[in-house]
Image (cartoon, grey):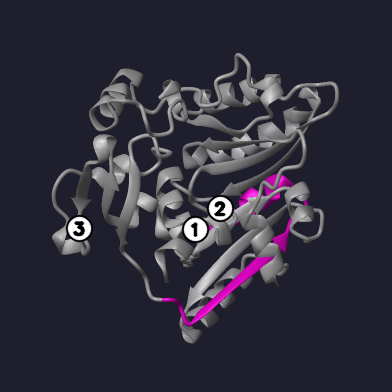
């Protein structure tokens, strides 16, 4: 399976390899394939002053030197330009099918997803969507569990038998529905998107809290949760003349209380003043500044793009 497709990023046809690394793009296949850095073996990059640096290697047994691949992954182009990358790849499975099961409510959907995780299955992807996200994908406007299974013909037959014992409601999910969910959240004018990263055990409680409390903030929220990865993606639409800021601050507080964090990936300019889209940085800002100074001393690459104004 080519590594770019194995990441399953949104807007796949427009994603470049350099952009994949710089933005650390991951989709539903993160459950089976990990993050970008898990399969990135080596890179060659141009840094400040036009210098070329290399890190890692072309094959697993030849990975050496400073771990520049992990440093550049997710840096949003603030450290340099990746001009070459080597990835670990996987063979394409003989059979690759996706199933969708409608559920009575969001809590039932998370319970079914948990049952899939406990079963003798190894899904490539396992997602939970609320009714709004399901409608966007052309499914029934009810919460759904989406499971993607892959392998040889006999392996798939065994997995289908195992998953059928968990629910009788599974149906094949079409390519159009999968493509729509891969691109979620697709935003309209004035919409906001956020990515929540949480301990896996906290994903379902956080999603249920968001679904329950969103209305008190005068916002309309749709969600897609990567069950098993602890990642939840939100599309937030404020009901005029309301602003989504109060809800986003509450969602960030909820994440911190649960041991996670919230990054606002898209926010209309009218609401950005005084609001930090990054929230709590994963590393001390002073350390990140020193790395930026070492690789890009003149601040040429994407100034102000990253957390802490880097």
Q: Residues within 10 Å of mark 3 (few under 14, many from 20)?
A: many
Front: mark 2 or 3: 3
Determine if residue 173 is in view: no
> Which quarter of the rendered picture does the C terminus lie within?
top left
Q: Verify whether residue 100 appears in magenta.
A: yes
Residues shaded magenta: 92-118
The mark lying in front, picked from 3 and 1, is: 3
Instruction: Tell me the element at label 3.
Output: loop
Foreground: 238 or 28?
238
Q: Of the numbered discs in the image, which one, if any, rests on residue 118?
A: 1
- Labels 2 and 3 touching (C-beta < 8 A): no
Q: Which is nearer the eye, 202 or 151?
A: 151
State the SS at label 1: helix
Spot occupied by residue 123 in the image (x, y as percentages of width and height): 50, 65
Residue 204 belongs to magenta span: no
Q: Residue furthest bottom?
A: 153
Q: Is residue 86 above or below residue 269?
A: below
Q: Secondary structure at mark 2?
A: helix
Q: Earlier in the sequence, mark 2 or mark 3?
A: 3
Residue furthest to the front in view is 49
Question: Would residue 79 appear left or right of 143 to someone viewing this image?
Answer: left
Q: Residue at x 39, y 52 (%)?
A: 36
Q: Is residue 273 above or below residue 59?
A: above
Judging depth in this view, the residue of 58 and 105 nearest the camera is 58
The disc label shown at residue 303, or none: none
219 or 179, which is in the foreground? 179
Marker disc for residue 114: 2
CB atoms at circles 2 and 1 under 8 Å apart? yes
Disc sitting over residue 57 in the figure? 3
- Quadrant for the N terminus in the image: bottom left
Residue 218 percent coordinates (x, y): 81, 25
**Spatial separation of the CA atoms under disc 2 and disc 1:** 6 Å
């Amino acid at each position: 399976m080519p590594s770019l497709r194995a990441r399953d990023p949104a807007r796949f046809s427009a994603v470049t390899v350099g952009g994949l690394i710089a933005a650390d793009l991951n989709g539903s296949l993160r459950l089976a394939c990990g993050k970008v850095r898990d399969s990135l073996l080596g890179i060659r990059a141009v840094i400040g002053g036009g210098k070329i640096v290399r890190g890692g290697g072309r094959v697993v047994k030849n990975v050496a030197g400073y771990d520049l691949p992990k440093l550049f992954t997710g840096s949003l182009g603030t450290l340099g330009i990746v001009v070459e990358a080597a990835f670990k790849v996987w063979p394409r499975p003989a059979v690759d099918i996706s199933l969708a099961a409608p559920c009575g409510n969001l809590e039932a959907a998370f319970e079914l997803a948990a049952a899939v995780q406990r079963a003798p299955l190894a899904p490539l992807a396992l997602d939970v969507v609320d009714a709004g996200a399901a409608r966007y994908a052309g499914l029934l406007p009810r919460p759904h569990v989406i499971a993607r299974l892959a392998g040889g013909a006999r392996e798939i037959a065994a997995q289908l038998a195992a998953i059928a014992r968990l629910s009788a409601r599974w149906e094949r999910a079409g390519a159009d529905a999968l493509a729509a969910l891969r691109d979620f959240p697709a935003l309209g004018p004035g919409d906001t998107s956020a990515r929540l990263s949480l301990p896996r055990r906290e994903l379902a409680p956080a999603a249920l809290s968001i679904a329950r409390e969103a209305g008190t903030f005068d916002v309309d929220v749709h969600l897609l949760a990567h069950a098993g990865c602890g990642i939840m993606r939100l599309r937030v639409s404020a009901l005029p003349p309301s602003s989504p800021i109060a809800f986003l601050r509450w969602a960030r507080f909820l994440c911190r209380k649960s041991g996670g964090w919230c990054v606002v990936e898209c926010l209309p300019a009218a609401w950005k003043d005084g609001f930090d889209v990054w929230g709590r940085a994963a590393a001390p800002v002073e350390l990140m500044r020193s790395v930026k100074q070492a690789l890009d001393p003149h601040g040429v690459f994407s100034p102000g793009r990253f957390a802490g104004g880097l």
